[in-house]
Image (cartoon, rainbow, N blue to C red):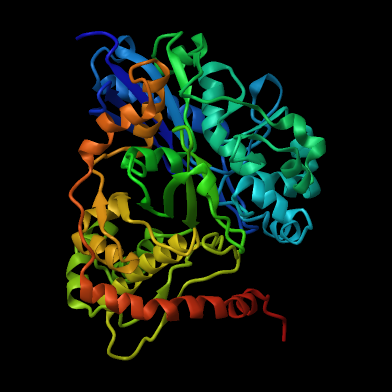
Amino acid sequence: MDSGDIILGLDSGTSVVKAVAFSLTGEQLDCASARNRYVRGKDGSAQQSMSQTWQDAAAAIRQLAERVENLAARVVAVAVTAQGDGTWLVGAGNQPTGDAWIWLDARAAPTVERLAASPLARARFEATGTGLNTCQQGAQMAHMDRFHPELLDNSEVALHCKDWLYLNLTGVRATDPSEASFTFGNFRHQRYDEQVIAALGLNHRRHLLPEIIDGTQTTHPLTAEAARMTGLRAGTPVSLGYVDMAMTALGAGVHTGEANTACSIVGSTGVHLRTLPTEAVWLNPAQTGYVIPLPWPGYVTQVQTNMASTLNLDWLLKMASDLLNSFGCDVDHATLVQHIDRWLSAASPGELLYHPYISEAGERGPFVNAEARASFIGLSYRHEFGDMVRAVIEGIGMAARDCYLAMGNNLPGELRLTGGAIRSPQLRQILAACTGVPVRCSRREEAGAAGAAMMAAVAIGAYPSMADCVQTWVTPLLAEAEAPPAALTARYQQLFGSYQQIRSELPSVWHTLKQPVTDR
C-alpha cells in the first residue's frame, strides 16, 4: 500500500463514537465505531464519563486499524469533532473534574430563565447570535457557579467534548472558533467577548476559557501516549474540527458556492442550518437559535435546532413494540421501521397536527421552553396507528419550516438533507412539501467525520481552500433535486398557521402539567 493517503475523521456523538478513514479525494474507505454511554437523573441531569469517552474514541480508532491495512503508516492527519454544547471540566494533570454535563442536561433551566431576564441579555445575544438554553456551556457554568461552585473551583479549564478528545490526542487545551463564539464570544470576529462573559456572570471564571484555534490553519502532533492508546504514529498532525452540527452540514452540502442553501440533519434531534455571509445574519426578536461560523472565510451558518426530531418517531414505535411484546409478540424497532412507508401511504395527508416536543428537556428551537411537551391535535375514533405515524413525520416537517422561518421570515432556495431517516422517499416528500422548497440528499455516509477531515485536508495543504475541497468531497455526492409535490405543499401551507398558533398557546398548559400533585 502507498503511504500517506488517508485522513482519519473522529466523530464522537452522544451514543456512538465513529472513526472513519477517508482518501485524500474524499472517498470513505472504512468506518469503525464504539458505543458511548450517558446517565440521566430524575433531577434533569445528563452526564457522561469523560475518561470512558476517551477510551471509547481510542477503541474506535484501534478497531479501524483492524479493518484498514497499514492504517498508522497511511494516516497523514487526524481530525476530531463531537457533540456540541455541554461542559467538560478538566483539573490538575489534565484529569476530569467529574463527569461531563452533556447537552441533554436540563438542570440549568432556572438559570437560563434568570439570565434571559437580565438587562445584558440582548447585548449577549447580539454578540453571539445565539439564544440561551440549558444545553449550552455558558448557561451550565453559570448554574454551576451558583449551585455547585466546587466543580468550577476544582477545574483549570472548561472544554467541550471534541476539545477533551483533542486534549487527549495532543496534550493541548483548546477550543475552536465555532463553539467559542456562540458560547462566550462574537461570531463576527470569532473570539471571546468580554461583554458576553459579563452577561453570564462569569468574569471571575474567565481563566477557565481555553485558547481558540482554527483547525484549517493550526495542527498539533499526536502525543506518544495517544499513539500508544490508538495505535497511530506519534507526531501525526491533529486538526481540531468545529462543532458536529457545522461539520455534518459542511460534509452534507450546506454550502457549495450557491446562495441561499440550507441543510437539515434529520436525526434523533433536528438541526436546521442555512448558510449566509457573516454580514447578512438576521437576529430574531425572540433571541433563539445559533450563529455558527463555518471554516469557510466570510460565511456562517444560522441555526435552529429541535431537541427531538426522529426521537418522536422512535417514541411512537417503542410504544407499539412494548405493547406487542407484552402480549408475547416478538417485534423490535427495526421491524416496525420497515412498515413506515406502508403506513404513510395508507394515511391521508394533514389529518392531524402533531407538535414534536417529546424531549424531556423541552424545546430550544425556534423557541426555548424546558416545559414544552408533544401533543396530537384532531384525533378521532376512526384514526389508526398509521395516521399517528404520518402526523409525527408531518410534525417533524412543520417544525423544520418553523425553524427556517425563525431565521429571517423566509425559506431557503434549496434544502440539502442528511441523516438515516432520509432514506425514505415519502419522508423526503413530506419534508419538501412542509418547507415548500426542493430537497436534495447527500450520499455522504459519515458527514460529520467528513467535515472535520476536510478541515484537516486544508490544514495539511492537500487543498488550497475549503471551496476547492468542497468541489471534490461534497458536490459530486449530492443527488438530484426533488421538487415539493404541489397538492401536498398547498395542504401543509394551509395547516401551518394553525400549527404555529397552537404551539404559541400551549405554554400555559405545559406549565400547569409540570406542577406537582399535592397530597389530598
- The answer to whether 52 is drawn above or below residue 427 in the figure is above
Q: Position of residue 475 (x, y in %)?
A: 25, 38
Q: Inspect this view and state whether residue 342 appears.
A: yes
Residue at point 26%, 56% (across, down): 439
Residue at point 38%, 65% (across, down): 396
- Camera-side residue of 96 and 132: 132
- The answer to whether 328 is drawn above or below residue 84 in the figure is below
Q: Position of residue 513 (x, y in %)?
A: 60, 77
Side (left or right) of 518 relative to 499: right
- Camera-side residue of 107 and 291: 291
Side (left or right) of 440 relative to 513: left
- Camera-side residue of 113 and 496: 496
Q: How many marks?
A: 0
Quadrant for the C terminus in the image: bottom right
Quadrant for the N terminus in the image: top left
The image quadrant of residue 206 is top right
Q: Inspect this view and state whether residue 330 appears.
A: no
Q: Residue furthest right?
A: 204
- Camera-side residue of 340 and 27: 27
Residue at point 49%, 55% (across, down): 304
Side (left or right) of 22 relative to 408: left
Q: Position of residue 286 (x, y in %)?
A: 61, 64
Q: Position of residue 464 (x, y in %)?
A: 36, 20
Residue at point 66%, 28% (across, down): 210
- The answer to whether 493 is drawn above or below residue 169 in the figure is below
